[in-house]
Image: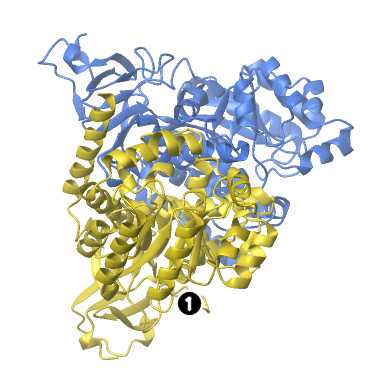
Chain colours: A blue, B yellow
Amino acid sequence: MQENNWDILITGGTLLTLSAGMEIIEDSFIGIKEDVIVAVGQNKDRESAAFQAKETIDAYGCIVMPGLVNTLTHLPMVCFRGMADDLPLMRWLNDYIFPAEARFVNKKMVYDGATLAMAEMILSGTTTFCDGYFFEDAIAQALSTAGMRAVVSQGFADFIMPDKPGFEKAMASAQRFVARWQSHTPMITPAYFCHSPYTCSPATLVRVKEDAREAGILYLTHLLENKDETNTILNRYGKRPVRHLLELGVLDEQTVAVHCNWLSKEDIAVFADLGVKVSHNPESSMKLAAGIAPVPEMLQSGIIVGIGTDGCASNNDLDMFREMDTTAKVHKVTSLDPTVMKAETVCQMATVGGAKVLGLDKLIGSIETGKKADIILVDMNQPHLTPLYNCYSQLVYAARGADVKTSIINGRVVMKDRQLRTIDLHAAMKNVRAVAADIIARCAG
Amino acid sequence: MQENNWDILITGGTLLTLSAGMEIIEDSFIGIKEDVIVAVGQNKDRESAAFQAKETIDAYGCIVMPGLVNTLTHLPMVCFRGMADDLPLMRWLNDYIFPAEARFVNKKMVYDGATLAMAEMILSGTTTFCDGYFFEDAIAQALSTAGMRAVVSQGFADFIMPDKPGFEKAMASAQRFVARWQSHTPMITPAYFCHSPYTCSPATLVRVKEDAREAGILYLTHLLENKDETNTILNRYGKRPVRHLLELGVLDEQTVAVHCNWLSKEDIAVFADLGVKVSHNPESSMKLAAGIAPVPEMLQSGIIVGIGTDGCASNNDLDMFREMDTTAKVHKVTSLDPTVMKAETVCQMATVGGAKVLGLDKLIGSIETGKKADIILVDMNQPHLTPLYNCYSQLVYAARGADVKTSIINGRVVMKDRQLRTIDLHAAMKNVRAVAADIIARCAG
């Protein structure tokens, strides 16, 4: 095993591999060399007692598991956290969020917001996320500093694009964005995000998808978030949203549909048939009263579903532990069946499921030899996590982001004992407070 | 103001009073003498600069607010946390919880479980709770040590009572329990808890209520948690549950109905008319797929509704911040109306609303001169709580139990800077792990 060459040894924790066999290893060890997991096993089987890893992390009393994958964020929206709550979705979007974005979104706001959001994510166990917003260059830059892994998607919408004037310019800029960051794979994976079928014309939807296919990148879109969307698209195009997208030819295995709260049985069959992936954001959809996606039915049809928090203006946090809890509970009560969405299933969705949604499952999502070292330690030595009968239950129903003790992304320790190593937390909070102060001052004026 | 005589001065925080006028005071101060709040205001109006309170607590960067009131717990059930999840309610109760209670519940288990649960509650901002279980003497003893405030109710059920053999003995023991603890009011308020109309005969329900009336104490019962309950009671007694209780004469202002997921419009009218209070436990009811209570309708009818976590076997934590978040969100999506259950309303339910449910609102639930000093400080200087536009939104949608920095109950600092002052946390966890180890060993054997 050549332990002398390991950069990091994690030892003594209960390891949830989240591999296909869902192995759980007590008193485990993980060897990491550079960015890769090179050894996984039980301490009693470890060959050398006299190993010399450069850094040894004691995981006694911790659950060791893959870092969480947040399949939908709009990071800079942390700047709008709590700005306008308890409002109808369309009023929230049209009277508050879109105007605020048109007025206040700029490169610096995006960088500052993304940096704070990444601090929050690392502190709550997320190691990989998928973001869709404007000025994604700034997000990619913030990412490099923070050392997180992400799919970063440049947004398209016909009527609101604070960073670009017209479609052709937007497309050209997006192509440059992809070219610029594609070499940073697998830390930064560029993608395209068409806001929705109701904000993007068929021409935009098709053209962006063609370009995504050519570049071999993911294509995301919000879909059927709100009940009204069916009527809007039906009135405009004479067909229901999924049929509309199907006929435009934009649905395939590289398409991620976000929300899908009002997906019909036929829609589910179409998605399952074409391999379309889904990002499920229950807390955002509950808070906006948008609807509850038929996730148990999707999973039963074989659709790959990941979990996401959505932006902070509609959640209002980025805590994937909280999102797992809600994911498990909301579908039980909606279906009046407590056996759906078991804790184990939800843990899979938040790790390897999310990795599959983002097309990154060959690299991350489970702890296995050869995979990238994206690993978190959850400190179970706490009153609300005592006693411990079942690790999955505990993680989903009782743990919270603040219980994550240490986080490793791509073999780099980005947080240890709750201290961030890559982000200046004080500065990150100060910068976002300045953005908010500006919003308050100018909106009052 | 005689600041020289204050025992505690809390200074510099943003104070949410939760009083009738919902005043918010920036750069606030609170003076506490013994167990009582003797002064509240803004620092600039504070008379003497040279005060000499015995202990000064710097609340800069914190929200200062009344401690949270958890209107339903079954504390010793922390010992069953995560033992049996993702199961149908009746199977969960009949195959796991009731047998485990019959076999493992004893005085020591109750004391140890309650102590750990109180540690968890203090660490997550709860200062008052209402418990219903067996061996409530042991809970009252644990309470005295922990320094929490509670309504402690002795449970009645015709078929499961591990602590007592027959009804008359149970009643006599409960009367002694009340006599023993009634003098400890307002820290410990005894009450009676009839498990439910389907586990208690009409005779039990009536006799316990008569006794509660005589003693002037609260009377609680689980009601309409599950959809089937209506049919069960209809088949047994020829009437629906609320009608059944109404005709038995057990519904009045001193009755708290727990869950009420399947309350009809007529039931709501009955409750509003008679002043029956409700304890709403959304996370437990979601996890057990029991149902979603019509809380917006109850509030509109003037029913007083508090929030509770229920026991740890069905939640699986005691974090009232998480419960507030879920309370706000689940009713929005159920009604498809994001304007119901506003953050401010939910904060009221979790503080002064809960105090009203428990009949303690003259003493606690808001921060006003003359009230008991039950106060928590929430540390807002954190990434997931930045920026801050609206305190109520932030508390409900983004804060979590771990953000509570300091807690004062009845004028006593029970936690400071997240360090418990009244409970040995290490011992509390160790004791409950021993209970769980015993359960695992004996259930495997």
Q: Residue at x 73, y 51 (%)?
A: A90
Is B331 placed above or below A304 here? Answer: below
Q: Position of residue B385 (x, y in %)?
A: 44, 54
Residue A383 in view (yes/no): yes
Which image quarter: residue A68? top left
Q: Is residue A366 above or below residue A416?
A: above
User: Residue lying farthest left?
Assistant: A50
Q: Residue at x 67, y 56 (%)?
A: B264
Quarter of the image with the C terminus of chain B in it: top left
Q: Residue A102: x, y in percent?
A: 67, 51
Q: Position of residue A130 (x, y in %)?
A: 54, 32
Please, what is the three-letter code of the amino acid marked with disc 1?
Ser
Please tell me which residue lies in front, B181 or A379: B181
Circle 1 chain:
B
Q: Is residue A276 left or right of A13 when viewed as pictured?
A: right
Give A41 or B212, whichever is nearer the viewer.
Answer: B212
In this rendering, the answer to whether B373 lies above or below A156 is below
Residue B306: % across, % down = 49, 63
Q: Which residue is mark 1?
A: B19
Q: Residue at x 23, y 43 (%)?
A: B432
